[in-house]
Amino acid sequence: MPNISDVVVVEKVVEHRKTKHCVCISVATDKYLMINTSHRDIYDDFEIESSEYMFLKSINRFVCCSEMFYVSPDKILRSVGNLNRDDMLKIVNKIQDSKIMDNTEKDSVLPELKKWLSDIP
């Protein structure tokens, strides 16, 4: 079972892809954010540096913070690493400030994310 900040490869999170990298933002609700290869304003995303993460294979990626997805544990193919505290803090800030994401969805993950951040030195 993944922990908050774990990046996993999942099976068919979106129709046109066979697999997708996603970051866990809630263990309690199995919620994830997608990691994309290109920037799009509609995704309310931010860039993560490939130099920080071996699994990015020298190409910067973008964490989509406009929509979270439920991922069934049986769709997780493997874990490839985790995001650092600074990038997870960016996720929390993006979710809090999002004008796109539903407030009920925000409320379902923010307490767990904030607790996780407060427990990390």
Image: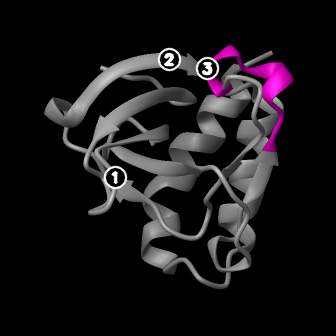
Q: Amino acid at mark 2?
A: Val
Residue annotated with mark 2: 80
Q: Quadrant of the N terminus?
A: top left
Kindly identify which numbered label has been placed on residue 38: none
Q: Are marks 1 and 2 in contact (CB under 8 Å)?
A: no
The part of the chain drawn in magenta is 48-56
Q: Secondary structure at mark 2?
A: strand
Which badge, 1 or 3, is on the more N-terminal residue? 1
Q: Main secondary structure of the magenta part?
A: helix
Frontmost residue, 120 versus 94:
94
- Indicate yes or no whether the magenta region holds residue 50: yes
The mark that comes first in sequence, 3 or 2, is 3
Toward the bottom, the furthest residue is 99
Element on which disc 3 rests: helix
Q: What amino acid does circle 3 point to?
A: Phe
Q: What kind of residue is marked 1?
A: Arg
Residue 62 image position (x, y, % from top left): 70, 51
Q: Nearer the viewer, mark 1 or mark 3?
A: 1
> Which one is closest to the eye, mark 1 or mark 2?
1
Could you tell me which residue is drawn at 45 percent across and 60 percent down? 68
On screen, residue 80 versus residue 59, left or right, reads left
Compared to 79, does 102 lie above or below? below
* Disc 3 target residue: 55
The residue pinned by badge 1 equals 17
User: Whole-percent x and y of residue 17?
Assistant: 34, 52
Task: Characterize the local packing of mark 2: few (<14), some (14-19) or many (20 or more) Cα atoms within 10 angstroms.
Answer: some
In terms of depth relative to the viewer, which is nearer, 73 or 108?
73
